[in-house]
């Protein structure tokens, strides 16, 4: 599978798993706790977008031409804050209606986002010597933990 095909496959899987979680959730009223988790994840995602530029932002794990490494804001602590945001929001969905199926789909989403992060990091390592230093100072997806 080509690199581009792999990237698009990961993005497709990501959106399929998100859609399945939302569809599985249904129209029931979520708990306040679940809503807080979703809003915290969404708020963190908006903060992350504020720290980045649209010219850098890419939904695939491929690096855009002329992209620059962002190491401020949310990126000061984790290399993939948008993935963290998605995981937190979808955790809120899972918490609102926890079932074995929703937990399984969530695990598949986690694996998919880790694969995307791994591919993006490999490309950055090839492109930027600065990335090696940045990688040593930050966590991958979960601040201060992982």
Image (tube, rainbow, N blue to C red):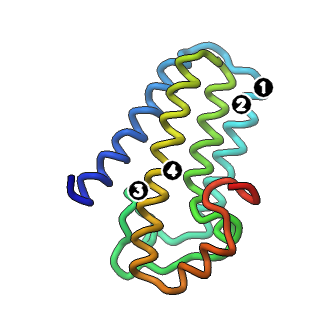
Indicate which label's residue lies in the foreground, 3 or 4: 4
Q: For the residues labelled 2 and 4, say whether their Cβ atoms are less than 8 Å apart.
A: no
What is the secondary structure assignment of the residue under circle 4? Answer: helix
Indicate which label's residue lies in the foreground, 2 or 4: 4
Q: Which mark is residue 59?
A: 3
Of the two numbered discs 2 and 3 on the same chain, state the one appearing first in sequence. Answer: 2
Q: For the residues labelled 2 and 3, say whether their Cβ atoms are less than 8 Å apart.
A: no
As measured in the structure, the alpha-carbon distance from the residue carrying label 3 to the one carrying label 4 is 14 Å
Of the two numbered discs 2 and 4 on the same chain, state the one appearing first in sequence. Answer: 2
Q: Which mark is residue 35?
A: 2
Mark 4 neighbour density, 10 Å: few (under 14) some (14–19) many (20 or more) = some
Q: Which residue is mark 4?
A: 114
Quadrant in the picture for residue 41: top right
Residue 69 relative to residue 88: left or right: left
Q: Which residue is mark 1?
A: 32
Indicate which label's residue lies in the foreground, 1 or 3: 3
Of the two numbered discs 1 and 3 on the same chain, state the one appearing first in sequence. Answer: 1
What residue do we see at 41% from left, 56% from top?
Answer: 59
Judge by depth and name the residue closer to the eye, 102 or 59: 102
């Amino acid at each position: 599978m080509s690199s581009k095909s792999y990237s698009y496959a990961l993005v497709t899987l990501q959106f399929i798993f998100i859609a399945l979680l939302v569809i599985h959730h249904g129209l029931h009223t979520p708990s306040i706790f679940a809503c807080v988790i979703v809003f915290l994840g969404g708020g963190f995602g908006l903060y992350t977008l504020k720290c980045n530029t649209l010219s850098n932002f890419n939904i695939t794990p491929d690096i855009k031409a002329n992209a620059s490494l962002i190491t401020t804001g949310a990126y000061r602590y984790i290399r993939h804050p948008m993935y963290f945001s998605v995981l937190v929001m979808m955790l809120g969905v899972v918490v609102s209606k926890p079932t074995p199926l929703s937990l399984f789909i969530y695990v598949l989403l986690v694996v998919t986002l880790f694969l995307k992060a791994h591919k993006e990091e490999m490309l950055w390592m090839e492109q930027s010597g600065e990335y090696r230093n940045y990688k040593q100072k930050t966590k991958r997806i979960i601040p201060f933990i992982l």
